[in-house]
Every structure is written in C-alpha cells, then in structure tokens.
Image: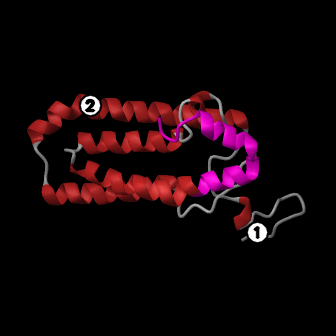
Amino acid sequence: MAPTTDTEPTVTARDTPGVIAPPPLIYLAGLVLGLGLQRRLGSSRGRRSAAAPVGGALLVAGVGLAALFLTTFGRAGTPVDPRKPATALVTTGPYRFTRNPGYLALALIFAGIAVLTGGWALVMLVPTLLVIDRGVIAREERYLEGRFGDEYRGYRGRVRRWL
C-alpha cells in the first residue's frame, strides 16, 4: 500500500456508509447462486423462448438505466463506489424518480439474465435484494442523512426508494 501524502485525504469508516460489500459483487453472487440453482433444477426450453422478449427488455432497460446512473454521477463529480466519501447529493436525472437507480438497474439486469436463462435464477433475486436493502441501502441512507442533513431528509421525503 502506498503511503498517503498531505494532498490525499485519509478515508475512515466514518467517511463512508460502511456497506457490507460492493453492490455489483452482491448482485453477481446472487446471480451465480441463482444460475447454480438453474443448472440443478433445469429449465423449460419452450418457456425460455417465449420469455426471451421479456428477458431482453429487462436487460436492455437495466443497461440503459445503469448508463444513465453512471452519467449522472459523473456529471455531479461524486464517486460511484460507496466505499468512498460522497461529495454531492445527486437528485437529478434518474434520481428524480428513484433514490437507487444503480441498484434498480442491477436488479433489472439480474432479472433479465434470469428470465433469459429459464427463470429459476429469478428466485435468488429476492434474497439478493434483501441483502442490498439491509447491507447497503440502509447504511447509505444513514450515512447520507448524517452527511447532508435536512437536504437529504427533504429529498428522501419526495422520492421513493425504488420506484
């Protein structure tokens, strides 16, 4: 590990939400477990082809929302990584409709892949979302309230967590 210089701020646990793991890894772990379930239980090939348009639409919607989320964070100049301190409260772009567009995008991508592969993997989306809700979102919300105070409380009162 490189030593810090006077120009590099030291990040402590108090400067971040303290999420349990990077959210993309949580979704990936849930998806891998779901695909393992899929492999064990098999899938109905007829259902898979009939569900392809739905799975494809979910996947495209998720990728599009993820791109919009990343662009919005980039414009605000605040880090996407929840292990780094937030430098701005983002309330524009997709944040006008949901407080968690990045996690919603990952859920849509997960659901799209699950539907395209036969659907059994979709069962793992629920426990994955519970881990995201308790281990990431709840911690981020406490952090953002502490960091941005009334500005965040007002935003939270106007915009739903998911949709």
Q: Position of residue 109 (x, y in %)?
A: 38, 41
Image position of 40 (left or right of 56): left
Image position of 115 (left or right of 150): left
Q: Position of residue 7 (x, y in %)?
A: 88, 57
* Overall secondary structure of the magenta section: helix
Amino acid type at image mark 1: Ala
Q: Is residue 28 above or below residue 161?
A: below
Q: Which residues are magenta?
A: 139-163
Q: Nearer the viewer, residue 125 or 56?
A: 125
Q: Nearer the viewer, residue 56 or 157?
A: 157
Image quadrant for the N terminus? bottom right
Q: Would you say residue 86 sits in the magenta stretch?
A: no
Q: Which residue is mark 1?
A: 2
Q: Residue 54's mark?
A: 2
Q: Residues within 10 Å of mark 2 (few under 14, many from 20)?
A: some
Q: CA distance from mark 2 to mark 1?
A: 48 Å
Q: Give the label, 2 or 1, closer to the camera.
A: 2
Q: Nearer the viewer, residue 61 or 97?
A: 97
